[in-house]
Image (cartoon, rainbow, N blue to C red):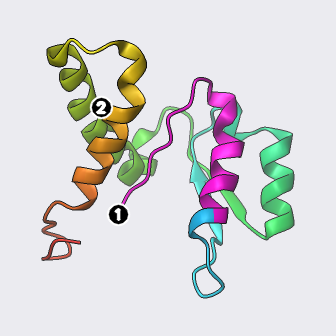
Amino acid sequence: MGWAYAVREKSEFTRCFKYFLDTYERPERRCHYLHVDQGGENRSDQLCIFCDNKGISIYYTATDQHEQNGIAEAFNRVLQEKVTPTLERSNLPRKLWPYILYAAVYIRNRSPSKALNKTP
């Protein structure tokens, strides 16, 4: 299962992460850690304070070591491989890319998975 949020600026990451937790976190399913790259948006004081207050540990990957965040990187690549050609072939205005992104996530989350041996 994957999620994606369309943002105009990377600095919106903290806001999106807060929204994600508000939407999906439950007492029996708490977020204990956040695994991110070393981008500036992931090192903001706002994010660090928020995670500290929630008891969430932040783990940073080594610089330029994308394989350390392999699951997220693969998910992003799959989405990019769906969104970019769809947008180019459809001749839709570029401002509609968030809707294509959300549709790609929706389809991806409902596609059969070898790892789970079922359709979610």
Q: Which residue is mark 1?
A: 1
Estimate the spatial distance between the alpha carbons at disc 1 and disc 2, rounded to whole Å: 16 Å
Mark 1: amino acid = Met
Q: Nearer the viewer, residue 98 or 38?
A: 98
Residue 24: quadrant of the picture? bottom right
- Quadrant where the C terminus lies? bottom left
**Residue at (43%, 39%) from the top-left corner?**
66
Which of these two is toward me, 72 or 110?
Answer: 110
Q: Which mark is residue 32?
A: none
**Nearer to the camera, 108 or 70:** 108
Q: Which quarter of the rendering shows the N terminus?
A: bottom left
Where disc 1 sits, the SS reads: loop
Tell me the tag on residue 80.
2
Q: Looking at the picture, which amino acid does disc 2 mark?
A: Gln
Find residue 102 and report its horizontal and vertical position in percent: 36, 42
**Residue displayed at 63% across by 77% down:** 30
Please name the residue shown 86% across and 41% down the image. Answer: 45
In this figure, what is the number of numbered marks?
2
- The crowd level at tag 1 (other Cα within 10 Å; few <14, some 14-19, many 20+) is few
Start and end of the magenta stretch?
1-22
